[in-house]
């Protein structure tokens, strides 16, 4: 009986993880990473990372990320399209909101608010060098 309960709990946990992965993949912050010729390899590597229980999260997914990197190298046009995407609408709105208001000399709270808004604006991820697994 305990084995049955454990199996059911494990299945429920996997279902919850699938929902978490699906929700994370729905984020517009991922842009074209999940689309195009490298989309399937990105989704697979991302899912592996989310499911990873390795002490150093994701270290058990090196092969999946290496495959994604190989795809990106094979399709430089896809990488160029990803890198040329305009900033998210939220970042543009935050920048516009931070630049208005305050005194005309730029020394008022409005100027400081602009700096605070710029600091809180999420930055687009920078490409990272992948670690090639040792064989």
Image (tube, helix red, strand yellow):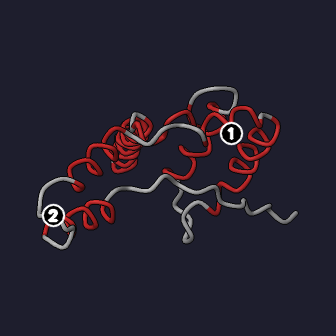
Q: Say few, some or many: other residues with alpha carbon within 10 Å of mark 2 (under 14 / 14 to 19 / 20 or more).
A: some
Q: Quarter holding the C terminus?
A: bottom right
- Quadrant assignment, res 59: bottom right
Decide if residue 4 is in sight here.
no
Q: First in sequence: mark 1 or mark 2?
A: 1
Give the residue number, with chain letter if any, for mark 1: 79
Q: Say few, some or many: other residues with alpha carbon within 10 Å of mark 1 (under 14 / 14 to 19 / 20 or more).
A: some
Give the residue number, with chain letter if any, for mark 2: 110
Up-down: is 98 above or below 96?
below
Decide if residue 75 is in sight here.
yes
Residue 122 horizontal/vertical position (percent): 38, 56
What kind of element bears circle 1?
A: helix
Residue depicted at x 65% and y 60% = 128
Instruction: Indicate which label's residue lies in the foreground, 1 or 2.
Output: 2
Left or right relative to 36: residue 47: left
Residue 112 horizontal/vertical position (percent): 21, 70
Residue 48 horizontal/vertical position (percent): 57, 48
Q: Residue furthest top?
A: 36
Q: Quarter holding the N terminus?
A: top left
Judging depth in this view, the residue of 15 and 119 nearest the camera is: 119
What kind of element bears circle 2?
A: helix
Marks counted in the figure total 2
């Amino acid at each position: 009986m305990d084995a049955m309960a454990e199996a059911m709990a494990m299945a429920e946990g996997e279902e919850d993880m699938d929902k978490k992965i699906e929700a994370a993949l729905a984020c517009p912050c991922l842009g074209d990473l999940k689309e195009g010729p490298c989309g399937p390899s990105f989704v697979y590597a991302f899912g592996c990372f989310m499911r990873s229980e390795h002490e150093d999260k994701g270290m058990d997914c090196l092969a999946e990320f290496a495959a994604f990197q190989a795809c990106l190298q094979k399709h430089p046009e896809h990488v160029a399209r990803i890198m040329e995407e305009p900033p998210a609408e939220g970042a543009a709105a935050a920048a516009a909101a931070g630049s208005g208001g305050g005194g005309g000399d730029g020394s008022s709270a409005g100027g400081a608010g602009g700096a605070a808004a710029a600091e809180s604006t999420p930055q687009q991820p920078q490409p990272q060098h992948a670690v090639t697994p040792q064989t």
